Structures are given as structure tokens and as C-alpha cells.
Amino acid sequence: MTALPDDSWLLSIRPQPARVTAEEYEALPEEIAKAIEIVDGYVVYCAAPTPDHQTAGRRLANLLERHARAAMSKGHECLTVNNDVDLRLRDLPLLNRRPDVALYRCLDRGRGERLRAEHALLVVEIVSPGSETQDTTDKLGEYAKAGIPHYWIVRLDRTGVSIIERYRLDRAAMLYKHIGTFMKDEPGDAPSVSNPIPIMIDWSELQF
């Protein structure tokens, strides 16, 4: 076996000494917490999103927020939409993700309520070149097991959001079932969904 050069960065890698606990994570400064996710107690560093990725996330959040406000005006419970939000899926071992967009029930700020899976109605991940496996396999399983009812996987082209893959939770199996894919170049009227709230996908709102 060929030995690594003495100056290889691989030689500086050290195993994480212990799993991160919920208490340790909550004590982290925000600038550190927002740059990592915790999977089974182990730190996973999040690559900085590209400008296109950030723009797509903001546009999706704006679209969802508009429809959430419309739903609330018709009597739906209080809803919140956020980008890159801290989402607790499990305490032991700690599983903490930061979905690109999340639609969730309003939290009790007075009690300092933390966003957990039971509050989330829909989470959205935008696929990047380095996140294909995480978004389409790892998180697909994690979000389902945590009981989040709806999951969207979003893909981009050079002009904006081009594909939205939709998954709905099968509570008997605690697995997601693919229930349809919206594609920007398909002819016809703007696609829409009725769950978790009525949402119409206006592709023009999701362009760069």
C-alpha cells in the first residue's frame, strides 16, 4: 500500500471524540450551529449554498408564505415559513437538520419552544451537486421516520426551480410515497396541491 505524503491533509483527520448531546448543541454559538447538522450525534458540515441555491430557497419560502397567509385568513391554524431553520428530529442520539425551507405550525415563543418534527407540515430540500445522496436518500428516510407529513425535493436549472418531486408520509409504514412530480416545462395550467395547505406553483415566482 502506498504511504501518504507527510504533508497530506488526510493525516490531520481525527475521529470525533464523543457524540454531541442536545445540551451541547443548544449551547453552541449561532454562527457555528448554522454551519453544521448533527446526525446520530456526529457533526456534519454544511457546504455554503451557492447564490442560485439561496435565491431558489428564498423564492420558495416566499411562495409558501403567501399561501400560508391565505390559508390562515380562511381559518387555518397559525403557520410559519422559514429558510435554513434548525429542525430537531430526535434527541437521542441527536439528529438535527437544517432544511432549505420549512412550513410549520407556529411555536410558542413565550415558552421558548424549539422547532421539532411534530410541528413541521412540509420540508423542502434543494438538491446541489454535493447533496444528491443526502437529499434523496438520507433525509428522505429521516424526515419520514420523524413523522413529517410532506417532503419536497427541488431541482434547479439555469433559470430557477425546474422540478419539484413530492412525497407524502405513509404513517402505517413511516415511509414516504412519491405522489407526483411537477416539471416547469410541462404544458397546461399551473400545478397545485391541496395538502398540507392549498398551494399553486407559479413557476414565474421561482425564477432567478
Image (cartoon, grey):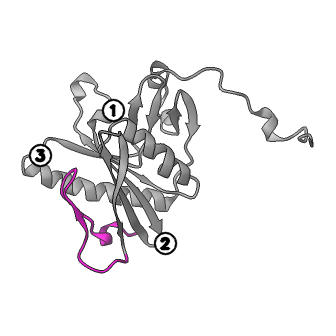
- In the picture of the structure, the residue carrying the numbered disc 2 is 158
Q: How far apart are the alpha carbons under marks 3 and 2?
A: 36 Å
Which amino acid, by three-letter code, is at mark 3? His
- Asked if the residues shown at circle 2 and circle 1 are in contact, with their CB atoms under 8 angstroms apart, the answer is no
Q: Left or right? Give the position of 43 relative to 2.
A: left
The quadrant holding residue 174 is top left
Which of pointers 1 and 3 lies earlier in the amino acid sequence? 3
Give the label on residue 116, or none. 1
Q: How far apart are the alpha carbons under marks 2 and 1?
A: 34 Å
- In the picture of the structure, the residue carrying the numbered disc 3 is 76
For the stretch drawn in magenta, the main secondary structure is loop
> Eyeballing the image, is 110 above or below 127?
above
Percent x, y of residue 163: 40, 66
Mark 1 element type: loop
Q: Nearer the viewer, residue 34 or 21?
A: 21
Which amino acid, by three-letter code, is at mark 2? Arg
Which amino acid, by three-letter code, is at mark 1? Arg
Number of numbered discs: 3
Q: Nearer the viewer, residue 189 or 53?
A: 189
| Rendered residue at 19%/52% (across/down) | 197
Give the label on residue 44, or none. none
Farthest residue, direction right: 2
Q: Nearer the viewer, residue 151 or 74?
A: 151
Percent x, y of residue 1: 92, 41
Instruction: Specify the segment rendered in magenta.
Output: 185-208
Q: Left or right? Give the position of 168 relative to 110.
A: right
Mark 2 element type: loop
Percent x, y of residue 182: 34, 67
